[in-house]
């Protein structure tokens, strides 16, 4: 497998997208660094649009979760692993109350990369979570270092491996990934990971306590008053 394609510049709390092969680095980097790892930027998505987007995303958690985290992620970003681990902690702590809806971002200059296509093709077989675990979880470092999507698929246990390979190599979901990138740009996503907690934007791979605090606030706001 060829080495992974770099799609972003790693910064303190996230990866700045290299959109269209052009990047005003100083402006985008300052935009990222303006966001403290413990502070949100106040931007929100209207709930109607938020739930429309999450319904089309890769879903992990209960269908009726009162708190949904919409995550825009790039698996080639060095912060993807720590953010993935934080999200798993939240799902385990709030098994009946938190769901994660994932959207993959692929900048135009990186659309030759098979990895994001492999994620979509795994999802086609109902194997999004096992594939993500095999790539981002413990034991996934060899796959991450080389972008070995086929090895990750084998470890994930994808049953129809030949069909999976045909799906990836035919670039079946390329147009879907382009649409998601345009969607993220429209929502002001300048880097990954970017998370929307019931619509409230959180920029970067913030500490899990920040996300936990937001989840707790959302749950408190939805608790019936006596």
Image: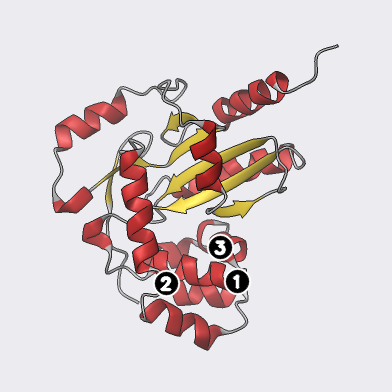
Q: Is residue 226 visible?
A: yes
Q: Is the residue 185 above or below the residue 218 in the image?
A: below
Give the labeled residue for mark 2: 148
Residue 104: x, y in percent? 43, 54
Residue 157: x, y in percent? 63, 76
Viewer-proximal residue among 177 and 152? 177
- Tell whether label 1 touches label 2 (CB within 8 Å): no
State the residue at coordinates (65%, 24%).
Answer: 218
Give the labeled residue for mark 1: 156
Q: Which quarter shows the N terminus?
A: bottom left
Mark 3 vs mark 1: in front: 1
Give the labeled residue for mark 3: 139
Q: Residue furthest bottom?
A: 162
Quarter of the rendering containing residue 29: top left
- Tell whether label 1 touches label 3 (CB within 8 Å): no
Quarter of the rendering containing residue 170: bottom left
State the residue at coordinates (64%, 28%).
Answer: 215
Distance from label 2 to label 1 (Cα)?
12 Å
Helix, strand or loop for disc 3: loop
Q: Residues within 10 Å of mark 2 (few under 14, many from 20)?
A: many
């Amino acid at each position: 497998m060829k080495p992974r394609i770099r799609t972003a510049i790693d910064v303190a709390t996230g990866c700045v997208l290299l959109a269209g092969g052009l990047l005003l680095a100083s402006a985008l980097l300052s935009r990222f660094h303006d966001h403290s790892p413990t502070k949100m930027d106040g931007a929100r998505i209207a709930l109607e649009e938020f739930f429309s987007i999450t319904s089309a995303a890769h879903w992990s958690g209960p269908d009726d979760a009162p708190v949904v985290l919409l995550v825009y992620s790039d698996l080639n970003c060095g912060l993807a692993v720590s953010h993935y681990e934080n999200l798993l902690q939240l799902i385990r702590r709030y098994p009946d109350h938190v769901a994660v809806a994932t959207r993959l971002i692929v900048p135009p200059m990186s659309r030759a990369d098979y990895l994001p296509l492999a994620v979509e093709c795994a999802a086609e077989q109902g194997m999004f979570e096992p594939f993500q675990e095999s790539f981002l979880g413990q034991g996934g470092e060899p796959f991450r270092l080389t972008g070995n999507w086929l090895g990750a698929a084998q470890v994930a246990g994808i049953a129809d491996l030949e069909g999976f390979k045909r799906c990836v190599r035919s670039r079946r979901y390329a147009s879907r990934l382009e649409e998601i990138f345009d969607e993220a740009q429209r929502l002001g996503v300048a880097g990954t990971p970017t998370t929307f907690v019931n619509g409230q934007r959180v920029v970067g791979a913030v500490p899990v306590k920040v996300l936990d605090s937001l989840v707790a606030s959302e749950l408190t706001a939805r608790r019936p008053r006596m």
